[in-house]
Image (spheres, rainbow, N blue to C red):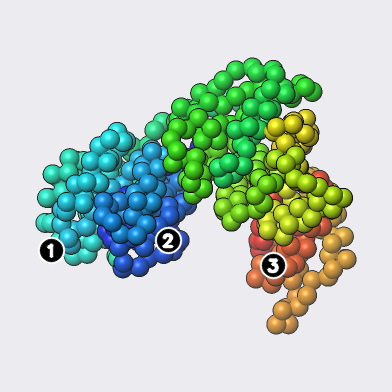
Amino acid sequence: MGFPVVAVVGRPNVGKSTIFNRIAGDRISIVEDTPGVTRDRIYTRAEWLTHEFRLIDTGGIDMGDEPFMSQIVQQAEIAIDEADVIVFMVSAREGLTEADERVAKILYRSKKPVVLAVNKVDNIELRSEIYEFYALGFGDPYPISGAHGTGLGDLLDQVVANFPEIEAQEEDDAVRFSFIGRPNVGKSSLVNAILGEERVIVSDISGTTRDAIDTRFTSAYGDEFVMVDTAGIRKRGKVYESTEKYSVMRAMRAIDDSNVVLVVLNAEEGIREQDKHVAGYAHEAGRAVIIVVNKWDTLEKDNHTMADFENQIRQEFQYLSYAPIVFVSAMTKQRLNKLPALIKQVNDNHQKRIQSATLNEVIMDALALNPTSTVNGKRLRVYYATQVAIQPPTFVVFVNDPELMHFSYERFLENQIRKSFDFTGTPIHLIKRARK
């Protein structure tokens, strides 16, 4: 289920962020003509022809003493470790540099497929400058231009040719779920506590493109689950465990492989910006989501503590308003017995289908409750709606003119659907379409 991962690496100021934005089709990374401006890895989902993949932009690898350089080097090395294919970028304008050779030595150690991209080949005269890069030992260099977008097709053809083969997964009724969150929120403790609580472990399942182990178990009520390795529980190295930024790529792999994602917060530390960052990927991927507040036993509580914490979560995670919240303790096993049933419930909601006739009764009642407004003398007319997909539930609403439906009215229709049907734990998508 997981997507291949492509990391764009190289020394500073060779145009990595520009190429990243070209491939992603959007200006996601900040582009500035200053070495070292990209300090964090940036992630996006991209596609080429029929291939979908994760793309990582990294800070430039350098061995100098500039501020933040050691952190940038660490981030790039983590990206290399997580990648299936590496795009090594150099610059035709500066030619082969000592820094390029140092980066090449790091890439040799990775033993990953490397595609060499020579950027800033903005005119025909510069094409003759690419041959010196054969000395790096990565085969044919691919001339590209971030400024003009030329050469990217040939480069991406070579990138996807190096993707690992992903084994087709057999049909399985087991619910696949994972814990995600920044380090030290207690993901590993929750995994161990749940397995100790349930005790019926059926098998360990090897991952298709990684050495992660997914664990199958049966709940006390007989429901089958597969707990997806969050690709950090078994990772070694202090860098992985001590720095919050490094949790994102591993969380994205787990999200891709899961039906249900449990976003873990640390009750002791409260909500951090990184919590929202990681949770946002689960929402954008359309996965069912449960918010799990761990270490609840460590707080001194009164009658308002839980309600206050829940209000804070709703305020900080407004885009996850559909996600149920459960307060647990891996240490004392408090409320852990509720998790399997809740996971099963939100997974069922994620796959729920609504009959068109029933759905349209709700839509017509909503129109009667809150009639559409007029924009520039033209009134929005909603004709009918139908469900076209699950995981997440997706509805097409046929109207006379999609431009007339304001986002607030779209939100109103979504709320009316949620009031009529139990979609706890799952996002739902509304697509506006003109009736032909």
| Residue at position x 23%, y 43% in the image | 104
Can see residue 387? no
> Do residues under tags 3 and 2 come within 8 Å of each other at their CB atoms?
no
| Residue at position x 61%, y 36% in the image | 187
The quadrant of the picture occupied by the C terminus is bottom right
In the displayed image of the protein, which residue is found farthest to the bottom?
A: 376
Considering only order in the chain, which callout, 1 or 2, is on the residue closer to the N terminus? 2
Considering only order in the chain, which callout, 1 or 3, is on the residue closer to the N terminus? 1
According to the picture, the residue beneath numbered tag 3 turns out to be 407
Looking at numbered disc 1 in the image, what kind of residue is underneath it?
Answer: Glu
**Disc number at residue 188?**
none
Residue 195, image x, y percentages: 67, 24
Considering only order in the chain, which callout, 2 or 3, is on the residue closer to the N terminus? 2
Residue 212, image x, y percentages: 50, 28
Looking at numbered disc 3 in the image, what kind of residue is underneath it?
Answer: Phe
Residue 13, image x, y percentages: 28, 61
Mark 2 and mark 1: span between their CA atoms?
29 Å
Residue 273 located left or right of residue 309: left
Label 2: which secondary element? loop
According to the picture, the residue beneath numbered tag 2 turns out to be 29
Label 3: which secondary element? helix
Residue 310, image x, y percentages: 77, 52
Residue 233 vertical placement versus 182 (above, below):
above
Looking at numbered disc 2 in the image, what kind of residue is underneath it?
Answer: Ser
> Do residues under tags 3 and 1 come within 8 Å of each other at their CB atoms?
no
According to the picture, the residue beneath numbered tag 1 turns out to be 125
